[in-house]
Image (spheres, rainbow, N blue to C red):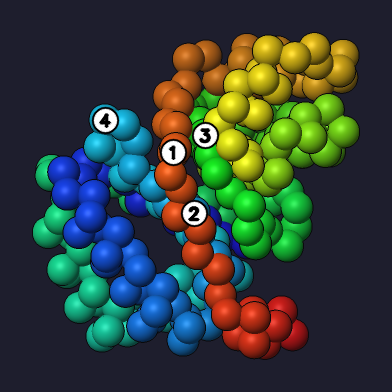
C-alpha cells in the first residue's frame, strides 16, 4: 500500500470542500488503484489529506491524467502558501479493509523518529493491541519512511469518545508500546480533524481493484 499526505493552509473551507466533492464525483470513480482517503481542516485552517493507493504506479497514473491535473491546478490556488506533499511506501491499516462510515473525529500525528526500524516494529504491535485496548478507535493508519518521518492517524466515531479513551486506564502492553513510541518520536505535531471528510471508491471499482 502507498500513502500520499498533502498539507497546507486553506482560508476558504467551503471552496476546498467543493473541490474535494468534485474530485470524489468526477475523478475518483475512474481512479484505478485509489483505495480511499480521509481529509479535513483543523481549527487553525490547516488542511490535511491522507490518500491511499495500491501502489506508487497507481498514484503516478492518476497524476498524469489531464482531468486530475486540471482539478489540481484549480485546487492548489485555494491554498495560502506552499503545499507540502509527503509519500510513504511502508503503510499499515486497521481494519485492513479501511473505514466505510461512522467517522466523526480523526487525530493525525506527525514527526520524525530516531530509529525508523524500531518505530515500524512498534507500530505493528500498536495496531495489534488497539482493537481490544482502545475500542473507541474505529480505525488507524501508521506509516514510516526510512529517514524516520512518520504519520499516525486514529479515527473515532466522536471526539467525546476519543477524549474519554485517552483518560481511561490502558492495558499494560499498550502502555509499554506507547511509551516506547514516545521515546523514539519526541514531541510530534498533532492535528485534530473535527469534521473529517471520508472518501472511498465505489463498491464495484473497489472490488475490481482487489482482484
Residue ID for mark 3 = 107
Image height of 79 relative to 66, above or below: above
Residue ID for mark 1 = 193
Residue at the image position 25 percent from the left and 44 percent from the top? 8
Residue ID for mark 2 = 38
Secondary element at image label 2: strand
Q: CA distance from mark 1 to mark 3?
A: 6 Å
Dot placed on the residue nearer the N-terminal end, 2 or 1:
2
At label 4, counting other C-alpha atoms closer than 10 Å, the crowd grade (few under 14, some 14-19, many 20 or more) is: few
Residue ID for mark 4 = 44
Dot placed on the residue nearer the N-terminal end, 1 or 3:
3
Secondary element at image label 1: strand
Dot placed on the residue nearer the N-terminal end, 2 or 4:
2
Q: CA distance from mark 4 to mark 1?
A: 11 Å
Secondary element at image label 4: loop
Q: Position of residue 181 (x, y in %)?
A: 66, 20
Q: Are marks 2 and 1 in contact (CB under 8 Å)?
A: yes
Residue at the image position 81 percent from the left and 21 percent from the top? 174
Amino acid at each position: 500500500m502507498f500513502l500520499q499526505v498533502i498539507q497546507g493552509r486553506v482560508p476558504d473551507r467551503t471552496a476546498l470542500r467543493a473541490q474535494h466533492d468534485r474530485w470524489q464525483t468526477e475523478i475518483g470513480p475512474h481512479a484505478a488503484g485509489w483505495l480511499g482517503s480521509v481529509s479535513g481542516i483543523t481549527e487553525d485552517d490547516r488542511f490535511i489529506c491522507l490518500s491511499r493507493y495500491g501502489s506508487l504506479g497507481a498514484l503516478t497514473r492518476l497524476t498524469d491524467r489531464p482531468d486530475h491535473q486540471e482539478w489540481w491546478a484549480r485546487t492548489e490556488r485555494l491554498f495560502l502558501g506552499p503545499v507540502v506533499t509527503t509519500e510513504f511506501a511502508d503503510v499499515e491499516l486497521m481494519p485492513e479493509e479501511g473505514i466505510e462510515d461512522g467517522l466523526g473525529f480523526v487525530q493525525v500525528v506527525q514527526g520524525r523518529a530516531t530509529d525508523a526500524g524500531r518505530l515500524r516494529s512498534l507500530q505493528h504491535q500498536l495496531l495489534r493491541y488497539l482493537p481490544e485496548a482502545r475500542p473507541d478507535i474505529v480505525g488507524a493508519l501508521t506509516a514510516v519512511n526510512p529517514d524516520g518521518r512518520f504519520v499516525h492517524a486514529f479515527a473515532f466515531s466522536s471526539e467525546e469518545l476519543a477524549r474519554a479513551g485517552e483518560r481511561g486506564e490502558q492495558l499494560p502492553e499498550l502502555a509499554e508500546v506507547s511509551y516506547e513510541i514516545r521515546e523514539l518520536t519526541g514531541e510530534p505535531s498533532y492535528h485534530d480533524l473535527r469534521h473529517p471528510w471520508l472518501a472511498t471508491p465505489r463498491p464495484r471499482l473497489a472490488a475490481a481493484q482487489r482482484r
